[in-house]
Amino acid sequence: MLRRLGKEEVRLGMYIHSLEGPWFDHPFWRSRFLLTDPADLQAIRDSGIAGVVVDESKSAGSAAASVQAARSEFLRQEVQREAAMAEEPRLVERPRPKPPRRVAVSVKPAPAPPSEPCSVAEEIDRAAETIERSKRTVAHLLSEVRLGRAADVATALPVVEDITASVDRNPHALVSISRMRSKDEYTYYHSISVCALMVNLARQLDHDEAAVREAGLAGLLHDFGKVVVPDNVLKKAAALTDFEVAMIREHPERGHKAIRASGYSDVVADVCLHHHERMDGGGYPHGLKGDEISLQARMAAVCDVYDAVTSRRPYKAAVGPAQSLAAMFQSEGHFDGTVLAAFIRSVGIYPVGSLVRLKSNRLALVIEQAEGDTMRPLVRIFYCIKARARIPAFDLDLQRDNEDSIASREEPVKWGFAAWDSHWAALIRATPRAAVS
């Protein structure tokens, strides 16, 4: 039974079914959970939320309460794991090099050596070059598959190495800049982006070096079966016919056959075949469920959907990264909860390139993720809402600033930023004025 309460009426043990207002306008990264933490209760009371809807059948004392509590607490701990690890001494360092401590500066720093972690601003041009080189190779590989020839493994591996190097220097630059793709080049860029997302996610899941590169290769080749689907079907703006839907649903098996013929690994072939399976068994081509789906295919399902939803397509506009994550989290039965939580940590609640509104009534661009705190990234403030005017850009580290925080995500078009992808890329390359901390 659902019941609406004012925020002052909420008590520990209640199952929150929904919070009034947009997903990113309230202080939680999920909207349905069992309220067990006093800090969460206080956050509700301190927020601007007018009320909540409580599901009494799932509240403490009901038959489902213990299951919901366990799931809620597990996902909460997964998202906050990085913060907990940061507060404890580590006996063994993770294989991935830690990014340098973020320091906002008034002049643009010299480019870091190719193997060194660096900022998005330092990596963005290098990432763009990597994308262009990779696009040419992917186009060649797709052409070979389209002609019925084996796709040379040796050709694909350098692409994965280049993309992995870019992700290791900065895990957000390449994926962010790839969203500036033309809608007609979706197939090439999608392969490159999913490769980068898979590498970043594999790092987040602490995979070893060989597994990281295999995940990247699987991401690069996961959609190769689509080369046999005519462009007029892939780019069709109108509703697809039953025949066209069936044709598209054949692409995992066709891609799997091509990957097998080319001599790629079992993992790469499995990802190509099963990246459209769902945890509840509602996917295709085999209707696999839960643990029947390999970990790598579950990873690819998350990365594939995220990039597809955030991309411009011939038949649809792109959805903002933050809004996409919200929708994915609320998609019951589609994704593995552990993998999705790790993915959210890897890209951040507010991914690089997001437009956000601060409590101080200023607009800012997210330019770096905070290590261990996805809610308080480094932002570049550039617009005063009260004056409705641009201001000289400067950086603010929300991890260090206790006076300001993100109030909401914003749609760029609402503020007149129609070509947002180009706008934020120029803004991130610009030299901010003296830092504010």
Image (spheres, rainbow, N blue to C red):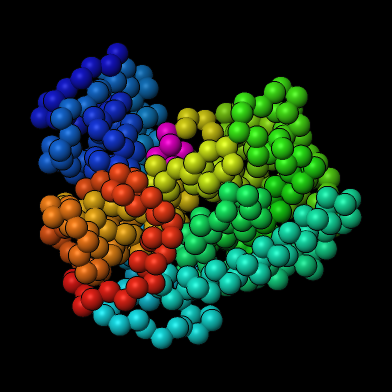
The majority secondary structure of the magenta stretch comes to: helix
Image coordinates for residue 23, horizontal then vertical, percent: 31, 37
Image coordinates for residue 59, horizontal then vertical, percent: 28, 23
Q: Residue at x 51, y 57 (%)?
A: 180
Q: Give the camera-side residue of 50 and 338.
A: 50
Q: Residue at x 78, y 67 (%)?
A: 155
Q: Residue at x 69, y 49 (%)?
A: 222
Residue 75 in view (yes/no):
no
**In the picture, residue 411 is in which quadrant?**
top left
Q: Is residue 17 magenta?
A: no
Q: Is residue 432 above or below residue 36?
A: below
Position of residue 31 in the picture relative to residue 215 (left or right): left
Q: Residue at x 79, y 68 (%)?
A: 154
Question: Quadrant of the image for the N terminus?
Answer: top left
Q: Is residue 222 above or below residue 121?
A: above
Image coordinates for residue 207, horizontal then vertical, percent: 57, 61
Span highlighted in magenta in the image = 324-330
Q: Is residue 281 above or below residue 120?
A: above
Position of residue 62 in the picture relative to residue 291 (left or right): left
Residue 30 in view (yes/no):
yes
Farthest-out residue, left: 8
**In the picture, residue 380 is in which quadrant?**
bottom left
Question: Quadrant of the image for the C terminus?
Answer: bottom left
Image coordinates for residue 151, horizontal then vertical, percent: 83, 58
